[in-house]
Amino acid sequence: MSKQLRRSSAALELQRAHGWAPFTHGQMHYSLLIRDIESDLLQVHERYGLGLTVWSPLVSGFLSGKYTHENMADKDNRMSGFDIMPFDKEAGFRLVDRLRNIAGRHKASVAQVAIAWLLAKKAVSSVIVGASKPHQLDDNLAAANLVLGVDEVTALNEMTKPAPVYPNWFSELVLDPQVKAALVK
């Protein structure tokens, strides 16, 4: 029996012995601005039919569109002193402009478009919104009724596509087409 198979069997025995349910769902940060989980974790979720609940889909409110170059340094807003999720702010402002354009076509808000993009992802089961005011909650919940066009999702995907990480970029360089095809199966 292979080492990996023994580990899997041991994990199943442990789950059964303690009455634990098998892993079926993950809760992770994922957004148009921070797409790190796409290099590996999102693919695992999709391949094995695992659910994904996303937290902070608006990146601490940045993707709501309420922040501007001018008010970023304002000491009264959370983004001025709270950078727990670092991201390229200039790229973020360009993205918000694109979201604003899409939102206008749908008569929706910037936040709704950002959340609708997540809900369009096959692996995303649910989104945890962190509204601090009732009108924000109502706005966020309305995203469930917004269906973005394939062209809009594709444009947002391309605009925010993360740089490949190692070893993924290395594998792309060295694997021949037959090996790549075999690995995808």
Image (cartoon, rainbow, N blue to C red):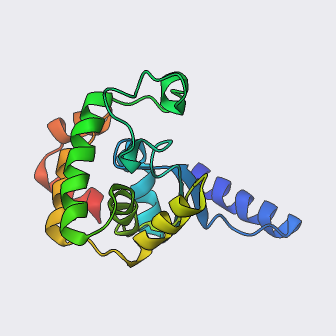
With respect to residue 141, does 171 lie above or below?
A: above
Instruction: Name the residue at 32% across, 61% down.
Output: 113
Would residue 101 appear left or right of 17 to someone viewing this image?
left
How many dots with numbers? 0
Residue depicted at 19% across the width and 41% down the height: 172
| Residue 107 in the image, given as x and y percentages of width and height | 26, 70
- In the picture provided, is 113 more to the left or to the right than 172? right
The residue located at (23%, 71%) in the rendering is 106
- The reply to whether residue 157 is visible in this rendering is no
Frontmost residue, 103 versus 126: 103
Residue 33 versus residue 36: which sits nearer the camera? 33
The quarter of the picture where residue 93 lies is: top left
For the C terminus, which image quadrant? bottom left
Vertical arrangement, residue 149 with respect to residue 109, above or below: below
Give the image quarter of residue 24.
Answer: bottom right
Image coordinates of residue 61 in percent, x first then y, are: 47, 44
Foreground residue among 101 and 176 = 101
Q: Is residue 24 above or below residue 29?
A: below
